[in-house]
C-alpha cells in the first residue's frame, strides 16, 4: 500500500505576464499537472509524451512532448539521445539542461 503524499501547490495565475483574454493558468513544479494542462489545451491524438529520468541520485522525471505528424523524428531521437547521455548526480532545474 502506497501512502506517500507529495505536497504540491495549485495551478495559479501567471505572475510575469498579464492577459485580458485567454487562458490564465501556468506551469508549476508538478510534471503530472503540467502534462494535464498541455493535454487539455492540445487535444491532438498525435501528441506524444516520452518520459525520461535524469540524474543518478535524484531520478528527476522529465517529458519530451511532440506532435507526431509535425515533428521531425530524427530531431526528436537526437534530443532524446542527448538527454539520456547526461551523467550527473541530479537535475533540479530545467535551466541545467541547456
Image (tube, rainbow, N blue to C red):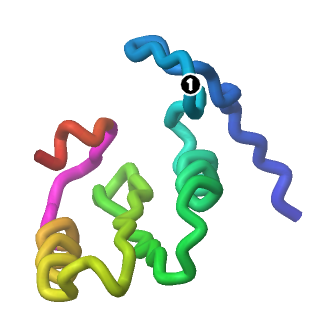
Q: Residue at x 13, y 78 (%)?
A: 75
In percent of the image, x 66 and y 26: which residue is there? 9
Instruction: State the SS at label 1.
Output: loop
Return the residue found at the far right: 1
User: Which residue appears at 40% of the width and 53% of the height?
Assistant: 60
Asked if residue 86 is among those painted magenta in the image, a careful observer would answer yes
Q: Position of residue 24 (x, y in %)?
A: 59, 27
**Residue 95 or 24: which is nearer the viewer?**
24
Residue identified by numbered label 1: 21
| Span of residues in magenta | 85-92
Q: Quadrant of residue 87?
A: bottom left
Rendered position, 15 above or below 1: above
Which quarter of the rendered picture does the N terminus lie within? bottom right
Give the answer, above or below, for where 25 lies relative to 90. Answer: above
Name the side, left or right, on which 56 lies relative to 19: left
Residue situated in front as seen by the camera: 31 or 69:
69
Q: Is residue 69 magenta?
A: no
Q: Is residue 79 left or right of residue 44?
A: left
State the predominant SS element of the stretch in magenta: loop
Point out the residue furthest to the front here.
21
Dot 1: few (<14), some (14–19), or many (≥20) neighbours within 10 Å? few
The answer to which image quadrant residue 8 occupies is top right
Question: Residue 53's image quarter?
Answer: bottom left
Residue 80 is situated, as x and y percent measured from the top left of the image, at 22, 75
- Relative to 87, residue 7 above or below: above
Residue at left 60%, top 49%? 37
Left or right, residue 35 beside residue 76: right
Count of marks overlaid on the render: 1
Amino acid at each position: 500500500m502506497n501512502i506517500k503524499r507529495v505536497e504540491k501547490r495549485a495551478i495559479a495565475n501567471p505572475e510575469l505576464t498579464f492577459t485580458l483574454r485567454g487562458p490564465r493558468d501556468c506551469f508549476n513544479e508538478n510534471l503530472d499537472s503540467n502534462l494535464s494542462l498541455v493535454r487539455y489545451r492540445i487535444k491532438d491524438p498525435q501528441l506524444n509524451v516520452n518520459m525520461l529520468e535524469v540524474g543518478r541520485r535524484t531520478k528527476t522525471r522529465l517529458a519530451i512532448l511532440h506532435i507526431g505528424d509535425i515533428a521531425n523524428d530524427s530531431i526528436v531521437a537526437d534530443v532524446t539521445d542527448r538527454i539520456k547521455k547526461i551523467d550527473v548526480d541530479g537535475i533540479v532545474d530545467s535551466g541545467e539542461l541547456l
